[in-house]
Image (spheres, helix red, strand yellow):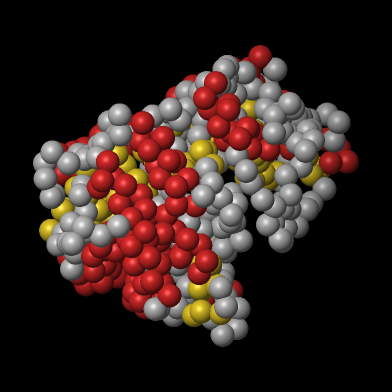
Amino acid sequence: MTGTRDGAIARAQGDFDTGRFVERLARLVAVPTESHPPQRKPELERYCHEVLGPMVAELGFGTQVLDNPDPIHGPVLVATRIEDPAFPTVLFYGHGDVVRAMPERWRQGLDPWTLKVEGDRIYGRGTVDNKGQHLLGIDAMAAVMAERGGRLGFNVKIMVETGEEAGSPGLLPFIRQHKDLLAADVFIALDGPRVSREVPDVTLGTRGGIAMDLVVNLREGGHHSGHWGGLLKDAGVILAHAIASIISRDGRILVPGWTPASVPEAVQAAAKAVRAEVLPGAPVPEPDWGEPGLSASERIYAWSSAIVLASISGQPESPVNAVGGAARARIQLRHTVDVEGDSVVPALRAHLAAQGFHEVEVVPVTERDMFQASRTDPNDPWVRAIAESFGRTAGQAPNIIPNIGASGPSEFFRRELGTPVIWIPHSYGGCGQHGPDEHGLGTLFRDGLGLMAGLWWDLGEKGRPT
């Protein structure tokens, strides 16, 4: 029995229609895998050893749970199925950890660790970030195997880490330590929201995220404003003007070197072609904010953005009549690969010096590892093959997104393993990700099962794209 592509898609979507997918997702969500060490490390281990690991082993994968090089953080599940060394190999990535559950903020009748279906919405912490999404890819593989008589037609290595929401501590040394184990032809991960519920997305990377503090420290304490106002420098005023020299009043970045000197033509074309939707209740992009002459999609997918995360001077909780001697602000830059991450802090220091802000010190934030910018070439053969497969299944071409606006571990895999890195989201912008009432849409899960079953089928039939 060889089966058919349509048969594989029908099997995958049938698992959703019968409730099997939702039942399996409920078992994953029930494990409280918050990645805030060391409180939840036993749960992260249980997720790998006792829940997801056995699900993957049922498909004929050899599974192992490996220690994180950073010992206070959770382990990594690696499952391998090699059907033929000559076949292409997919490294399929997901993360089993979730952000803090915040049960006190969920709507009455909802519990983060108990899956609940209300109409098209499927509630629970991790339903979309990321348990439901990596389960979707695994169940689509199971459907292809059932239709193809127990075979996929390609090799798979499934890697599920348990620290992504904490910044993936230990991930880079883990990849270096297990480079041979993780070697593959392509990296594919399912994560994040689509920009349109109607159009599939193929995302090729992430922006880098760099934070730095502006510190103005003129003198100890404060001095009476009636006696010293107008005579002593005000740290808050100096800080405000320094920020204004970095970001204009209409949101443009003013620091030389913080924006791309040029953008590859293929990236520009892909960003311009993105079809997005404005979701009910979601903010609407401000047309007069940010780099002029760029569309909203170009501003987020092909350009840099800078914001003020926090700013403080004096004692906001209880202001006093004093000239402040110290002030601090945290600035965050999101940038594409067209801006070198190592140059960001030196560029800001040079800019502030040139503007005369010698009192302002730039302190890089090192509280957590920062992800580097990453991008796969939109013309890569793997990108074309996936886009063609999705177009065949969906009846329309997908969005090719050069990089999402946020940050992630893409570059670790691209640089260390030498693979194209491709992210395929199956959520939507109103999913409550990282907040209370997180949920996935049944329609998008069902649609995603069909898209992924079609992709896995095509990969097993056609082999490596050229």
Give the quadrant of residue 280. Answer: bottom right
Residue 19, position in %: x, y?
A: 40, 78
Residue 374, position in %: x, y?
A: 43, 33
Give the quadrant of residue 223. Answer: top right
Q: Residue at image x 55%, y 32%?
A: 270
Q: Nearer the viewer, residue 86 or 193?
A: 86
Residue 404, position in %: x, y?
A: 52, 41
Give the quadrant of residue 247. Answer: top right
Residue 48, position in %: x, y?
A: 24, 65
Q: Quadrant of the N terminus?
A: bottom left
Horizontally, residue 358 falls left or right of residue 94, namely right
Horizontally, residue 263 falls left or right of residue 128, namely right
Q: Residue farthest to the right?
A: 226
Horizontally, residue 243 falls left or right of residue 105, namely right
Q: Is residue 123 visible?
A: yes
Above or below residue 43? Residue 444 is: above
Q: Nearer the viewer, residue 101 or 396?
A: 396
Q: Residue at image x 22%, y 43%?
A: 89
Q: Residue at image x 41%, y 35%?
A: 384
Q: Residue at image x 26%, y 46%?
A: 461
Q: Residue farthest to the bottom?
A: 109
Q: Nearer the viewer, residue 8 or 66?
A: 8
Q: Nearer the viewer, residue 217 or 331?
A: 331
Q: Is residue 134 visible?
A: no
Total marks drawn?
A: 0
Horizontally, residue 37 falls left or right of residue 179, namely right
Q: Quadrant of the C terminus?
A: top left
